[in-house]
């Protein structure tokens, strides 16, 4: 893959270990210091992560597929990271974040509503990561001979929130340069885990009910928690690339930095799940490390594993917290990016404390994934369809405007074809959803009629794209002709 070199960062813009000055505003070309290869380092540093190990365990235990089915679902599901690569191509041309670009497909005011969905999603992922950090800290405390009570759990959450605040507060350059340093130690950890676990794998593990319906549900679970679930963040991190950065290099480096490590780590989780009998898929998935009769790793490896796992979880949470901060700005909060990060952190603190004391982790994760897929699948289809209808170009200056005279304002600041397509696509996603919570039969009739098969991702994307083209295709192409000379 050939890559284009960008300029070194200029003072006052995006400098490592100083608070980033940019939010959702346009990044001047003189400050586009990054290269496509930097995306690989950042994403790989976050993707070698224990979170995906837990997903692999849940896949084969909580969702009930056998070993070879789980392997197939993991490989196919992680191909969705190609979507993340494609959803990172708009940032270099526009020089701004995802939900500023999103104004083209929904209008400045319509985009605010979709940005709210994304902000809630990012806070959910941040909370999920913090819950795992607290669970790991609890097990470390038990290994040390202490039994943490409720005050200790609250303390773990507060300390975790304070630590995870650091990288997002400093910003993009700090995240990119820090996360790539984590790749080597994580690779060493993975090799050690593989050596300790693969010999115990039960390749003949069979779960009841793993028909094609269950396979589709497992595939939807994997797609949402892999590539699809990150697409709404892609351009937040690619906007510091120069406009002439090679598109194939961007997609290729993003895919290598995400799909490859996450597939390997999920496969390792699947292997462990075959012989731990679901012990890691309960309320605290790390509790199995101190459960009598359950041997996950050699005893001496548990503490190093959990310590490194905590660092990994902080790394991936930094991406969520950064994106949720700029999304708050896109919603309309007129505050600096770093203040938006502080607001998100405070909210995440409260939600995590509630979740730690009141929810089963697997149930919480299943409900969260169901909600995410309903909005994100149709949104991505509309977002990419709009980009293609425009000949893959936007007017970057007009994206920054929210006044009635701006190109993308339309009627009342809303592009109704986009909003209607989103609503219809969400209804279609619900129809195909294998929900972990109660739904009226009419709202997931397709899922019930097919015996529980989960088609939410595919229905949501296909229906939303078709509706958007039908209602807005002509208008979007006309706008593209107006925008081309200005761009």
Image (cartoon, rainbow, N blue to C red):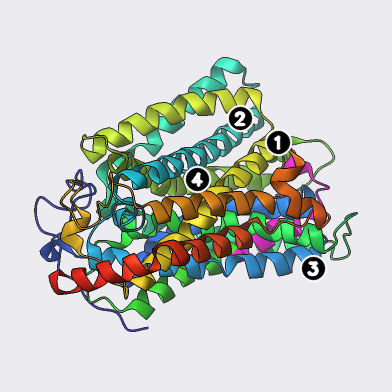
Does the CB distance between marks 2 and 1 fall below 8 Å?
yes
Is residue 275 highlighted in magenta?
yes
Q: Quadrant of residue 159?
A: top left
Q: Is residue 423 or residue 283 the one in the foreground?
A: 423
Q: What residue is disc 1 on?
A: 287
Q: Secondary structure at mark 2?
A: helix
Q: Residue at x 38, y 42 (%)?
A: 324
195 displayed left or right of 417: right
Residue 18 in the image, given as x and y percentages of width and height: 19, 45
Q: Secondary structure at mark 3?
A: helix
Q: What residue is disc 2 on?
A: 138
Q: Is residue 302 or residue 249 the one in the foreground?
A: 249
Q: What residue is disc 3 on?
A: 68
Residue furthest to the bottom in view is: 2
Crowdedness of circle 4 by 10 Å Cα count: few (<14), some, many (20+)?
many
In the displayed structure, 256 sits above or below 301; it is below
- Label 4, label 1: how far apart the Cα atoms are: 17 Å
- Label 3, label 2: how far apart the Cα atoms are: 33 Å
Residue 328 in the image, given as x and y percentages of width and height: 32, 39
Residue 57 in the image, given as x and y percentages of width and height: 72, 52
- Label 4, label 2: how far apart the Cα atoms are: 15 Å
Say which mark, if any, is on residue 313: 4
Mark 4 or 3, nearer chain start: 3
Mark 3 or 2, nearer chain start: 3
Q: Residue at x 45, y 31 (%)?
A: 348
101 displayed left or right of 258: left
Mark 4 or 1, nearer chain start: 1
Residue 105 in the image, given as x and y percentages of width and height: 36, 58
Q: Residue at x 39, y 59 (%)?
A: 234
Residue stretch rendered in magenta on the structure? 263-282
- Label 1, label 3: how far apart the Cα atoms are: 26 Å
Q: Is residue 135 or residue 229 the one in the foreground?
A: 229
């Amino acid at each position: 893959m050939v890559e284009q070199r960008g300029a070194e960062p200029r003072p006052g813009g995006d400098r490592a270990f100083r608070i980033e000055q940019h939010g959702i505003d346009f990044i001047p070309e003189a400050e586009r210091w990054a290269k496509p290869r930097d995306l690989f380092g950042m994403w790989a540093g976050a993707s070698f992560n224990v979170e995906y190990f837990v997903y692999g365990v849940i896949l084969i235990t909580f969702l009930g597929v056998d070993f070879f089915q789980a392997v197939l679902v993991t490989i196919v599901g992680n191909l969705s990271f190609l979507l993340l690569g494609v959803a990172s191509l708009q940032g270099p041309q526009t020089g701004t974040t995802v939900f500023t670009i999103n104004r083209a497909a929904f209008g400045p005011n319509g985009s605010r509503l979709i940005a709210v969905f994304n902000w809630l999603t990012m806070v959910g992922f941040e909370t999920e990561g913090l819950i795992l950090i607290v669970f790991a800290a609890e097990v470390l405390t038990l290994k040390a001979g202490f039994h943490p009570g409720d005050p200790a759990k609250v303390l773990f959450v507060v300390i975790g929130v304070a630590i995870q605040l650091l990288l997002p507060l400093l910003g993009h350059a700090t995240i990119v340069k820090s996360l790539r340093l984590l790749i080597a130690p994580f690779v060493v950890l993975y090799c050690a885990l593989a050596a300790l676990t693969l010999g115990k794998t039960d390749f003949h593990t069979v779960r009841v009910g793993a028909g094609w319906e269950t396979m589709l549900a497992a595939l939807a679970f994997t797609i949402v928690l892999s590539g699809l679930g990150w697409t709404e963040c892609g351009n937040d991190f690619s906007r510091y690339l120069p406009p002439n950065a090679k598109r194939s290099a961007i997609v290729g480096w993003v895919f290598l930095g995400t799909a490859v490590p996450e597939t390997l780590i999920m496969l390792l989780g699947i292997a462990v799940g075959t012989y731990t009998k679901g012990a890691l898929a309960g309320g605290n998935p790390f509790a199995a490390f101190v459960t009598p009769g359950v041997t996950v790793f050699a005893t001496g490896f548990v503490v190093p594993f959990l310590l490194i796992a905590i660092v990994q979880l902080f790394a991936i949470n930094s991406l969520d917290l950064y994106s949720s901060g700029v999304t708050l700005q896109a919603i309309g909060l007129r505050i600096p990016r770093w203040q938006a990060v502080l607001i998100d952190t405070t909210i995440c603190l409260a939600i995590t404390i509630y979740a730690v004391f009141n929810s089963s982790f697997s149930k919480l994760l299943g409900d969260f994934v169901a909600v995410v897929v309903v909005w994100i699948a149709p949104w991505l289809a509309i977002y990419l369809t709009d980009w293609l209808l425009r000949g893959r170009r936007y007017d970057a200056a007009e994206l920054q405007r929210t006044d009635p005279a701006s190109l993308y304002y339309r009627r009342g600041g809303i592009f109704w074809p986009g909003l209607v397509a989103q609503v219809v696509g969400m209804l279609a996603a619900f129809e195909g959803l294998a929900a972990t919570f109660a739904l009226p039969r009419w709202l997931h009739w397709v899922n019930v009629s097919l015996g529980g098969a989960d088609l939410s991702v595919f229905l949501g994307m296909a229906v939303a794209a078709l509706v958007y083209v039908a209602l807005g295709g002509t208008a979007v192409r006309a706008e593209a002709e107006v925008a081309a000379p200005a761009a």
